[in-house]
Structures are given as C-alpha cells and as structure tokens.
C-alpha cells in the first residue's frame, strides 16, 4: 500500500487510535504504580483490608488510603520527649506485671496507655476505627496487631475472651506500643 494514498482523514484516525492506545497504556501503568506504592506504604494486610471493605472496589479503596495519608499529614505529629518515653515505658512495665493478677484489666490499661501515647504524639483519639486508620499511615506493620488486640478487648468486655486471648491481646498491644514509643528513626540514626 502506498503511504501517499492515505487521505488526511485516515492519517488523523490512525494517529487518534495510536494516541488512545498510548493513553490507555499510560493510565494502566500509573494505576499499577499507585497500587504498588500504596501496597508498600500500608502493607499487604492493611491494603487488602481496605480493598475488601470498600464496596466500590480497588480504585475507591486506594482513594481512601490516599485520603488517610493526607489526613495524617495535616496532624502535628511529634516524637516523644525522653521524659515522656521513660514514663510510658515505666507504665507499660506495670501493665505487663499487672497482667498476672488481673489479665482483663491489664488489657484495658494497655489500650488506654496506647491512647495516651497517641495523644502525646499528636494523633487525635476518636473512635477506634479512625484511630486504627490514622496509625496505619505511619505504623502499617503493627496496625493489624492493634485491630486484633481491640477485637479481643471487645470480646473480653462481653466475657468471651479467655486468659490466653487476653495474653495474645497484650502481645499485640506491645507490638504497637514498641513501634510508637521507640526511638524516632532520624534520632536513632544519629545516635
């Protein structure tokens, strides 16, 4: 076929088709990159949870994860001061020791202590789901522990948690506690 035999209209149609195909490929690649970024930032567990809980599917879930990140960026988060860190660690040690004589109340104390740590760090402490969503932005690996501990604490309120369940809840709370109270990354690198 002779290229000079193509009409201007045919050339424009071919260019439009190429532009649409290139555009579709770019959209696909950008979406895939966004998915990978969010999956890495929030971790597989929290990312999957967001996708399965959103009725609108992956795209809506990813928009919600982006909104979470923006919300947390608006907070005035701060590292703990050395005295606050020492106070919280001391209180945590007491909570763990209290578990021996009162597992249920120790779990309640652990939950309250974490709320105090979050408040001191600058997180708003509203309902549990909002709290968990907020901490998932900066502490994605332990958010699953926090959710599991909270579920056990709720079962404990209705008298359906065993001592082993409560022990597991305290272990879950400890993972988040250590992550939130630990040395800030930038301070740990310079020390």
Image: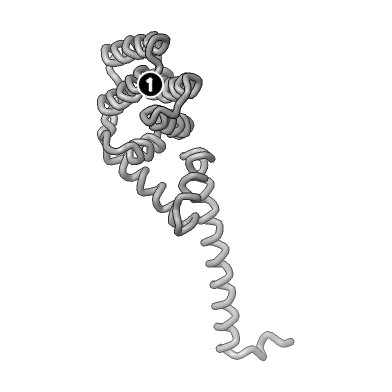
**Image point 51% across, 50% down: which residue?**
35
* Residue that mark 1 sits on: 107
**Image point 44% across, 29% down: which residue?**
160
Q: What is the quadrant of residue 56 in the picture?
A: bottom left
Q: What is the quadrant of residue 151 in the picture?
A: top left
Q: Quadrant of the C terminus?
A: top left
Q: Is residue 35 left or right of residue 97?
A: right
Q: Is residue 44 visible?
A: yes
* SS under mark 1: helix
Residue 34 drawn at (x, y percent): 49, 50
Residue 113 drawn at (x, y percent): 31, 21
Residue 81 drawn at (x, y percent): 27, 17
Residue 163's place in the image compared with 33, above or below, is above
Residue 102's place in the image compared with 175, above or below, is above
Nearest the eye: 39 or 6 = 39
Which residue occupies the extreme front position in the image? 159
Q: Is residue 139 visible?
A: no
Nearest the eye: 150 or 188 = 150
**Image point 64% across, 89% down: which residue?**
6
């Amino acid at each position: 076929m002779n290229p000079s035999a193509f009409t201007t209209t045919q050339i424009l149609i071919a260019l439009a088709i190429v532009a649409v195909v290139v555009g579709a490929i770019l959209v696909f690649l950008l979406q895939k990159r966004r998915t990978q970024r969010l999956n890495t930032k929030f971790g597989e567990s929290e990312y999957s949870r967001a996708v399965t809980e959103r009725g609108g599917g992956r795209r809506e879930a990813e928009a919600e994860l982006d909104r979470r990140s923006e919300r947390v960026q608006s907070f005035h988060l701060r590292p703990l001061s050395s005295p606050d860190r020492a106070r919280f660690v001391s209180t945590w040690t007491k909570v763990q020791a209290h578990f021996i004589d009162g597992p249920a109340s120790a779990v309640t104390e652990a939950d309250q202590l974490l709320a105090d740590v979050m408040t001191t760090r600058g997180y708003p402490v509203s309902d549990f789901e909002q709290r968990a969503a907020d901490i998932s932005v900066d502490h994605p690996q332990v958010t699953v522990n926090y959710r599991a501990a909270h579920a056990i604490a709720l079962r404990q309120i209705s008298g359906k948690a065993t001592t082993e369940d409560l022990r597991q809840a305290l272990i879950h709370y400890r993972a988040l506690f250590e992550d939130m109270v630990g040395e800030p990354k930038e301070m740990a690198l310079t020390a």
